[in-house]
Amino acid sequence: MITQGALPFKYELEKSQAGMTALGGLPLYLDLAAVIGLSKSIEKHVRVRVGEQGWTDVQVVMALILLNLAGGEHVEDLRRLESDEGFCRVLRRVEMAGLKRKVRRALERRWRKERQLQRHADAYVATLLREPSDADVAWLAAAATRGDDDHARWELRYARRAIGLLVAQRDALDDRTASIVAQVLGSAFEADQHIDQGRFGLAGRQFNARLSAYRDAIAARSAETGARLGQTLLAFSGGSFREVDETVRRVSDVLAGYESEANEALRSAFGAAVLPEHVPPSVAAGSSAK
């Protein structure tokens, strides 16, 4: 056992693996930060946060410091810290040290909400990462990619993920949902075993190009939106897309299925909006905006 320092934690030998951490050295740096008054210095000199929403300046700066100490190279590596149950328990205790009871309870409520939102986003994105059916891949390869199954498969992957993100942006119950879905989807790209190590940047650029094009197709808001989505996928696949023919309609049906699956998954993960009886949606929207 190591004697407790400036902060409310100490090291003990423990036989159980529950709540253990692989980042046992980091709390010593938290102790050092407390001794030198780092948190107060950040509060004094870093004034980026506006209002009460989101992480505090201290939390952001400390997260980046801890990320570097833990060997992280990207912001997405913060998930390594978040997934370490033992270290997160220590960090929560440290963050609440010296706070008033009312403030501690407010922080605990916010943490619970953030963890719940994260779980919902993970569940939703899991549906967007489903592999396209072999039948759809084979058909698209024959119709557009000149027999290139890998190209066809990636176009369908990009389409499902892009449409899923756009559905979250359009239909989510609050603005934070789309933001965290985008973060989780970005992390999924970083961890995608189908992407070669040196091609993450290329995959990201390709996805963003398709996301922008699918967004334009959906924003058209016309009876031909489905056809526009199909034409967009065929344009990226190298197929014929100028006429709304049987090929365009076939692809449109596949993408309509992706959109329907995303809508269902979004409601399942985050819940559906419930309007009071006899209150028109326009009236409810107007009152909630006040």
Image (cartoon, grey):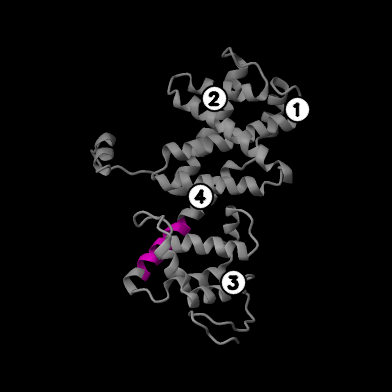
Q: Quadrant of the N terminus?
A: bottom right
Whether residues under marks 1 and 3 lie with C-beta atoms below 8 angstroms apart, the answer is: no
Residue 128 position within the rendered picture, expressed as x and y whole percent measured from the top left: 57, 41
Q: Can you identify the residue that label 2 sits on?
A: 229
Secondary structure under tag 3 reads helix
Q: Can you identify the residue that label 1 sits on?
A: 148
Among numbered discs 2 and 1, the one appearing first in the sequence: 1
Whether residues under marks 4 and 2 lie with C-beta atoms below 8 angstroms apart, the answer is: no
Looking at the picture, which amino acid does disc 1 mark? Asp
Between 98 and 115, the one lying in front of the other is 98
Q: Distance between the residues labelled 2 and 3?
A: 49 Å
Q: Can you identify the residue that label 3 sits on?
A: 26
Q: How far apart are marks 1 and 4 (CA)?
A: 33 Å
Among numbered discs 1 and 4, the one appearing first in the sequence: 4
Q: How far apart are marks 2 and 1 (CA)?
A: 21 Å
Front tag of 4 and 3: 3
Q: In which quarter of the image is the C terminus?
A: top left
Secondary structure under tag 4 reads helix
Residue 256 appears in the rendering = no
Label 3 Cα crowd, 10 Å radius (few <14 / some 14-19 / many 20+): some
Residue 76 appears in the rendering = yes
Q: In this view, does 236 lie to the left or right of 102?
A: right
Looking at the picture, which amino acid does disc 2 mark? Leu
Among numbered discs 4 and 3, the one appearing first in the sequence: 3
**From this viewpoint, which residue is outermost toward the front?**
45
Looking at the picture, which amino acid does disc 3 mark? Leu
